[in-house]
Image: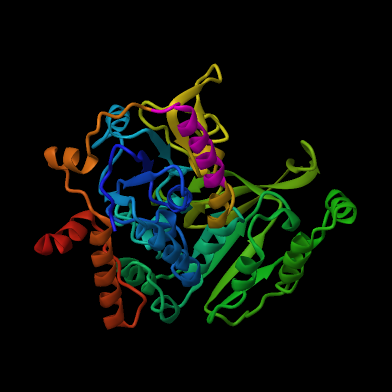
Amino acid sequence: MVMANNASAWKIAVIGAGPAGFYAAEHFLKQDEPTVTVDMFDRLPTPYGLVRAGVAPDHEKIKNVTRVFEKTADREGFRFFGNVDYGRDITLDDLEKHYHQVYFSTGAQVDRSLGIEGERLPRSHSATEFVAWYNGHPDFRDLDFDLSQERVAVIGVGNVAVDVARILSRTVDELKQTDIADYALDRLAESRVREIVMIGRRGPAQAAFTLPEIKELGQMQDAGVSVMAADMELDRHTLAQLESDPDRMTTKKLEVMRSYIGGTNPDASRQCIIRFLLSPIAIHAAPDGGAGSMTLMRNRLEPGRGTRLSAVATGITERLACGLVFRSVGYHGVALPEIPFREDWGTVPNQLGRVTREDGTAVTGVYVGGWIKRGPTGIIGTNKPDAIETVNCMLEDLASGLVFSPTGLDMAETLQERGICYVTFADWKRLDALETENGRVQGRPRVKFTRVEDMLSALSPQT
């Protein structure tokens, strides 16, 4: 139910409809006092951010968090404005005229660069692009990945890297049980990839993937996973750390990886190999101009800042033939129009979510949450305490009167006057039902709309 904005309610704008945005809206709307209304905006017609476009299609249970977000959207005082892009359709000046405060949760939208020779060769991609492609993100659905290559290198050993390796290793029958984009399913059905090599610059004890991710890699129908025995021999610094500060989760991950020595299924059609203590220093072109091989530097671990062990080059190199490369070494935020930004951090400078200028003073009425606030760390649930921290500051500032002075305009009317075709949450529910029904026909959880124009067209006959 949507409550009309009124003079007695504080009006909040949330820019970004991912987990950080929904957790903020939830915390606002469950307050008894003060009375708050929340208008949430996203540049896509669909809500949920990386839950829809980033969570691997074979991780359907993780996506169940959207049920919590749907309950928030059903609360009185909530409105969704999809297909409305901050910086294009609305500006900070618009927000100041319509709301008392604005909360930005736009995430970290681009991948970090390796900064090595050959990184931009054809067939060298970011994992971000590939993940968004197979998840049906409209911005990435027309990309092309050469899956005729037999060996793929995935640079990084975080959860995203594991997702990429796993999707490349799955059988078509396994993928048919997911909501992977239909065009990606067709392309992966024709894949000639036979070997995926994951490359970590530090050791197995420092690998960023979680225990469920590394266990799942060894449980696929027709793919084996292996590690080298030499890579599982821990250096003295790591052994000393684990002895002085035992970590149960690291120990369990090491146990799982040791079970992969020698391979889990050598007769499988595809093999995933995990390598450690290696850093790519150059990607080399094949005769056709695309990525063809990579030079890797062998590393050793030495004490760095605090308790962190750093990878130090040994000068020993090796060459790895690979016709397709995905880099998965982290994400970086994108500057927002009219909002302070730290390019070196890839985040908006802030104090507990209050956006700050170069001199450290707070920008009245402007706040951040999620990855654009803290950087690309944590899992979906990490965004909840992060959002609550920011919203609590916003509530303090509401009580202190540190707010914009809106003119009483209603954003729905403003967008209509500008001819901007926005999507409501009721509209999204109709799209959701159509996707689910299209999936039911094929025996799948859903078949996604992957073009904005198709989404709007599907809604137009009933609007």
Query: Would you identify the image quadrant in which residue 344 lies?
Result: top right
**Residue 155 point in image, percent of width and height:** 57, 52
Q: Assess whether residue 122 is covered by the magenta stretch.
A: no
What residue span does the magenta drawing correspond to? 386-403
Q: Image height check: is 407 above or below 141?
A: above
**Residue 21 point in image, percent of width and height:** 43, 48
Q: Image height check: is 117 above or below 450?
A: above
Query: Would you identify the image quadrant in which residue 453 lies?
Result: bottom left
Q: Nearer the viewer, residue 435 or 1?
A: 1
Query: Would you identify the image quadrant in which residue 374 lies?
Result: top right
Is residue 41 shown to the viewer in this render? Answer: yes
Indicate left or right for 390 with 277 as reference. left
Q: Assess whether residue 387 is covered by the magenta stretch.
A: yes
Q: Nearer the viewer, residue 146 or 455?
A: 455
Q: Main secondary structure of the magenta part?
A: helix
Q: Image height check: is 126 above or below 151?
A: above
Indicate left or right for 201 with 70 as reference. right
Residue at x 65%, y 55% (from the top left corner): 208
